[in-house]
Amino acid sequence: MKRIILTGALGQIGTELTVKLREIYGEDNVLATDIKEPVDSPLEGKPFETLDVTNYEEMERIAREFKADTIMHLAALLSATCEKNPHLAWEINMGGLVNALEVARNLNLQFFTPSSIGSFGPSTPKDQTPQTTIQRPVTMYGVNKVSGELLCDYYYEKFGVDTRGVRFPGLISHVREPGGGTTDYAVEIYFEAVKNGKYTSFIDKGTFMDMMYMDDAIQAIIDLMEADADKLEDRNAFNVSKLSFDPEILAESIRRHYPDFELSYDVDPVRQGIAESWPNSIDSSEAKRQWGFDAKFDIDKMTDTMIEAIKKKI
Ligand code: AKB
């Protein structure tokens, strides 16, 4: 990995991943792309191209001119947004993915794209969900993610494209906030705790979902992409997670800093329904065994880091 192009680089993962990749591989070896220009972003003023991922010709031209050897395809709509507009979700999530895979095939690029805990459904085992198990999601996002995992496997088996992927849980970060996701409450809660000392959660008490701090997610992507291909028995997609909590447990962690922090509920039936169709916790042992996945942030370390960073930011 030394000439890397990213799609969806202004998103929650892309922003921090681009910064980290530039630290490792050099600024000029990492080209960020997104459908909009960077404004108030750490990517402003750095190598950047606007790109609509549904436009194959543009994607291929940009990758070819940049002489990329790797493509990291991050552009996608998240779960709650997909439920609002399922046809648009199919067009962007699947159309963009097929284009990125075709660019990888035609230009011989290494390929990464994230899947999600959203690829699981109500009939999936709920606790310590294995990597290989029942995947019958009931959301458009989940349908996109399972199809994407299979398509990436197909491109590896059929065309020899070096595709690699993980299933991310909810990712917690402060640099760029997520939008349109079901796990977003676990980011909003920190900003509201610091700003107002209280938060109204759209996810109900007792709803457990997998979560991970962004630094661990970024390290996982880099480690998987650098992993020796001979060691990978699987490709798409590895379960990776560190934490499983409900809103009450997260609030307790926040109360170590703000003892009077108030948590109330105004449950959104759409996002609650999505959350209930996902696992409580997934098993990341295959990622550990095959390429050394090792997340470091426990819930309190994550809370300390988030609160410190948000205080500085606001
Ligand atoms: C979402 O909530 O949609 C995402 C995800 C878990 O894939 N954060």
Image: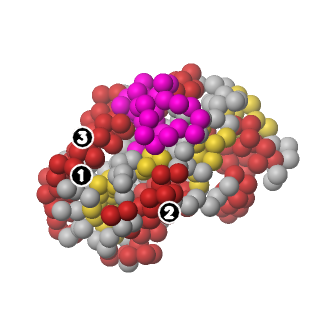
- Asked whether, in this view, residue 17 is left or right of residue 106, the answer is right
Q: What residue did someone put label 1 on?
A: 156
What are the residue bounds of the magenta stretch? 114-143
The residue under label 3 is 95
* Residue at the spot 44% in from the left edge and 58% down from the top edge: 290
Q: Which residue is mark 2?
A: 292
Image marks 2 and 3: residues in contact by CB distance under 8 Å = no
- State the image coordinates of residue 183 (x, y, percent, origin top left): 56, 39
- For badge 3, the amino acid type reads Gly
Q: What's the residue at 26%, 42% (across, down)?
A: 151
Residue beneath the point at 41% across and 31% down: 135
In the rendered image, residue 57 lying in the magenta stretch gets the answer no
From mark 2 to mark 3, how far is it between C-alphas?
32 Å
Q: Amino acid at mark 1?
A: Tyr
Rendering coords of residue 196 (x, y %): 74, 44
Q: Which amino acid type corresponds to the residue marked 2 in the rendered image?
A: Gly
Per the picture, the main secondary structure of the magenta-coloured stretch is loop
Q: In the picture, residue 245 is in which quadrant?
A: top right
Label 3 near ligand 1 (CB < 8 Å): no
